[in-house]
Amino acid sequence: MLVAGVDGCRHGWVIAVSPLDLSTVDVRVVDAFAGIVDLVADGTLAAVAIDMPIGLPDDRPRSCDAQARRLIGPRRSSVFPAPMRSVLDAADYDEACAMSRSACGVALSRQGWGLVARVAEVDAAMTPALQATIVEAHPEGTFTELMGRPPRHPKRTAAGRAERTAALAGVFAAPFGAPRMRGAADDDVLDAVALVWTAARLARGEALRLGDGTVDSKGLRMEIVR
């Protein structure tokens, strides 16, 4: 039984794959999220945790995002509000802001706009049935669970990478050192590897869920798993 953590990166998606016992971890970059869905469909992957919104609101912020910010405290700025569903059809940032203001009264951030293409890619592939196996997660929430507290340092700093690498070294049975990957930043790799732990919790039936139980217009649950 294999489980995986996934994070978006410059050249596609970082996917970290491990046996359920977390004895080893293999990390690679793939072009398309649809390929990861195929690995679920053919039974290769038993559980996947991805750092990308699943379940998009029409007119108000998601409860799970607010709960995640409270959970991670000083790292709360890393939880970007999920875009309104209408924003996926925007041609550019100005149009996205106008659509977001019309839907919920607030413009989309630049960081949020930078994620829209990835969000759309995931949304196109997801179904309510797939959410039994593929779930949204947040790496900083996972690290908070692992450490028993939010990380002290931002993840893009040397101290932050060292802090998170040390936390992951206590999870995997084999000696752990985050590999350098072409097309992916170091923090993308660490985030994907961290989400392997969350995926393993999902496969074992131990995962915890943030959210208020609401579903979006596609029937997708708006929740963050940890």
Image (cartoon, helix red, strand yellow):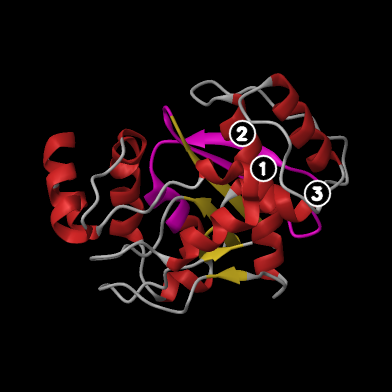
For residue 172, say whether it is visible.
yes
Q: Is label 2 in contact with label 1 (beta carbons under 8 Å)?
A: yes
For residue 2, say whether it is visible.
no
> Percent position (x, y) of residue 38?
44, 57
Decide whether residue 17 is among the magenta residues. yes
- At x 36%, y 63%, the residue is 126
Identify the element where label 1 is drawn. helix
Q: Give the amino acid at mark 2.
A: Val
- At x 49%, y 65%, the residue is 64
Q: Disc 3 and disc 2: Cα gap in Å?
A: 18 Å
Whether residue 12 is situated above or below residue 90 in the rendered picture: above
Seen from the viewer's position, the closer of residues 146 and 23 is 146
- At x 40%, y 78%, the residue is 214
Quadrant in the picture for the N terminus = bottom right
In the rendered image, which residue does mark 2 sit on? 189
Q: Give the amino acid at mark 3.
A: Met
In the rendered image, which residue does mark 3 sit on? 147
Q: What stretch is highlighted in magenta?
A: 10-37
Residue at the far bottom in the pictured view: 213
Seen from the viewer's position, the closer of residues 141 and 60 is 60
